[in-house]
Image (spheres, rainbow, N blue to C red):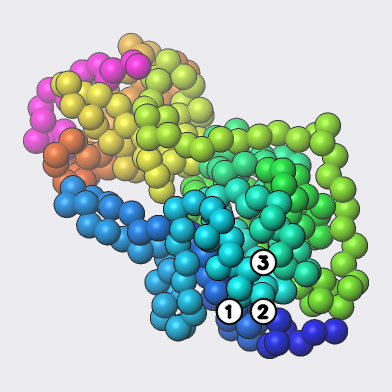
């Protein structure tokens, strides 16, 4: 059995969840010889270049970082020169061609935050919340050329709480992913892993999320709108239109009261609580952000904009 300190690991990932997995590998003394991540991207109004969380962590630990825009022949040759024994990947943002998967002698391991074959694709956490799922989990799998179709090495499920948001669920899935990965890799190194084929007949798929998907359709039931908020609170957020401007709903809650006496999209007030009427039930507004303005608590916003309560939000 090859000692993990001698194992030449290539790590591939980009967002915060990936950085947490990389940090766990380093803390467990795995020999990460190179990191692949997405190129720096421009963010904010000033379009300042921002490094990915994975790149920041790799540089902090003096690990060589590669951020090719495409896995072309030059990028693959550089990867080959690093003589990897194993690739570990989570949320990298690129599909690995077969030639890359064939490079490491132990293969490529992917951490996918869903119970595969459910929610194959790039947005499994958001998709579970959008669908109102009560259970999800993490899968450790051997990669093949398909999209999340490889053999399962290990899997564990967790419950999703009714009000749980993306941030909270991602944290839970990160913790369980770290545990599963650190349990699985020693078995793989010792030749004791027992890969299991996925049942393709049970597969479902999720897609890349677009910014415009955050727009609210007030004709939808309150539960659907609240699930969208839970799923998109990280990005892109949820928004509506009021007085011709985009109004982002930063914090909302779903009410248990049966409030259906108002026009769909109408903003109304009961005591010190402000609601928006949906197709079925109401959403409590707690913090909003009008386009070009800072985030504001809802009572402060309604005091500043006297015509807000009683207005009709764009139905989309």
Q: Give the position of the N terminus as an image quadrant.
A: bottom right
At 70% from the left and 33% from the top, the residue drawn is 204
Q: Give the position of the C terminus as an image quadrant.
A: top left
Residue receiving disc 3:
87
* Residue 301 horizontal/vertical position (percent): 16, 37
Vertical position of residue 81 compared to residue 278: above or below: below
Residue receiving disc 1:
33
Q: Main secondary structure of the magenta part?
A: loop
Element assignment for label 3: strand
Q: Nearer the viewer, residue 274 or 179?
A: 179
Q: Nearer the viewer, residue 102 or 19?
A: 102
Q: Which mark is residue 263?
A: none
Q: Nearer the viewer, residue 171 or 112?
A: 112
Cα distance, mark 3 to mark 2? Answer: 9 Å
Residue receiving disc 2:
8
Pointer 3 or 2: first along the chain: 2
In this picture, which residue range is highlighted in magenta?
Answer: 301-316
- Exactly how many numbered labels are in the figure? 3
- Circle 3/circle 1 CB separation < 8 Å: no
Dot 3 crowding, Cα within 10 Å, few <14, some 14–19, many 20+: many
Q: Specify whether 155 is left or right of 174.
A: right
């Amino acid at each position: 059995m090859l000692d993990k300190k001698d194992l030449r690991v290539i790590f591939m990932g980009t967002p915060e969840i990936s950085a947490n997995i990389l940090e766990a590998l380093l803390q467990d003394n795995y020999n990460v010889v190179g990191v692949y991540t997405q190129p720096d991207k421009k963010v904010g109004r000033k379009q300042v270049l921002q490094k990915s969380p994975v790149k920041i962590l790799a540089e902090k630990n003096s690990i060589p970082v590669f951020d090719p825009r495409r896995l072309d022949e030059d990028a693959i040759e550089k990867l080959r020169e690093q003589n990897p024994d194993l690739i570990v990947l989570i949320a990298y943002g690129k599909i690995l061609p077969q030639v890359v998967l064939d490079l490491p002698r132990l293969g490529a391991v992917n951490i996918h935050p869903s119970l595969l074959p459910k929610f194959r694709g790039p947005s499994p956490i958001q998709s579970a919340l959008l669908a109102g799922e009560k259970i999800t989990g993490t899968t450790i799998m051997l990669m093949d050329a398909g999209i999340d179709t490889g053999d399962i090495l290990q899997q564990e499920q967790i419950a999703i709480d009714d009000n749980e948001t993306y941030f909270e669920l991602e944290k839970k899935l990160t913790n369980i992913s770290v545990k599963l990965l650190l349990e699985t890799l020693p078995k793989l190194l010792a030749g004791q892993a027992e890969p299991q084929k996925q049942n393709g007949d049970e597969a479902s798929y999720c897609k890349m999320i677009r910014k415009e998907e955050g727009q609210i359709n007030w004709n939808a039931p309150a539960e659907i709108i609240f699930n969208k908020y839970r799923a998109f609170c990280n990005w892109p957020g949820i928004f509506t239109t009021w007085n011709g401007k985009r109004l982002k709903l930063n914090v909302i809650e779903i009410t248990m009261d049966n409030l259906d006496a108002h026009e769909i999209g109408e903003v109304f007030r009961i005591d010190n609580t402000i609601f928006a009427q949906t197709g079925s039930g109401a959403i409590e507004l707690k913090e909003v952000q009008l386009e070009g303005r800072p985030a504001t608590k809802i009572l402060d916003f309604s005091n500043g904009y006297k015509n807000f309560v009683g207005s009709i939000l764009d139905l989309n």
